[in-house]
Image: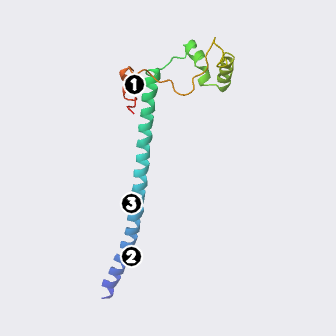
Amino acid sequence: MMIAEKLSKMWEDSLKTYTTEEQGLKLMLEKTAVEDSKTTQLAKERKLLDEWHSVFFGPRQLIPPENTMYWALTAAERDMETFVAIRKSWDTFLVPPTNEMGSSIPIGWVLPDGEADKNWTKYLSNA
């Protein structure tokens, strides 16, 4: 009887250890599943942003370094000082709303016509 009791005790101890390990592994799997769903969600959001970028600005293109005109015209996107300098020069052309010779920056979104291009239709709301 002594051997059977020892084996039974050893089996119960092993079962407790394996149960604890199983619970830990289940938690790890759940955590991985949550992380995977977050990664999937981020990928969907990135894809949607890429679609919006494509609709607004056309397909992305690789611009060669020799294209100095492109790099000069887009310098403000990469350098804050250039951005501020360009913005400052633009601000000199702003006029008050009472001035008949110019216009101000529109407040809010500038919406497309109802006859929008087919690329826009999936983004338009029928509300």
Tag in front: 2 or 3:
3
Disc 3 element: helix
In the rendered image, residue 16, in percent from the top left (x then y), is placed at: 39, 73
Q: Which residue is mark 2?
A: 13
Q: Nearer the viewer, residue 83 or 32?
A: 83
Looking at the picture, how far across and down is residue 27, in whole percent? 42, 59
In the picture, measured across the screen, residue 106 lies left or right of residue 120, that is right
Of the image marks 2 and 3, the number of the one nearer the N terminus: 2
Calculate the distance from the C-alpha at mark 2 to the C-alpha at mark 3.
20 Å
Q: Residues within 10 Å of mark 3 (few under 14, many from 20)?
A: few
Residue 25 shown left or right of residue 91 in the figure:
left
Picture layout, residue 115 above or below residue 4: above
| Image quadrant assignment for residue 45 | top left
Q: How many numbered marks are there? A: 3
Structural distance between the alpha carbons of marks 2 and 1:
65 Å
Question: Which residue is under mark 1?
Answer: 120
Name which residue lies at 46% across and 23% down: 56
Q: How is the image coloured?
A: rainbow
Residue 17: x and y, percent?
Answer: 40, 70
Q: Dot 2, crowdedness within 10 Å: few (<14), some or many (≥20)?
A: few
Residue 82's quadrant in the figure? Answer: top right
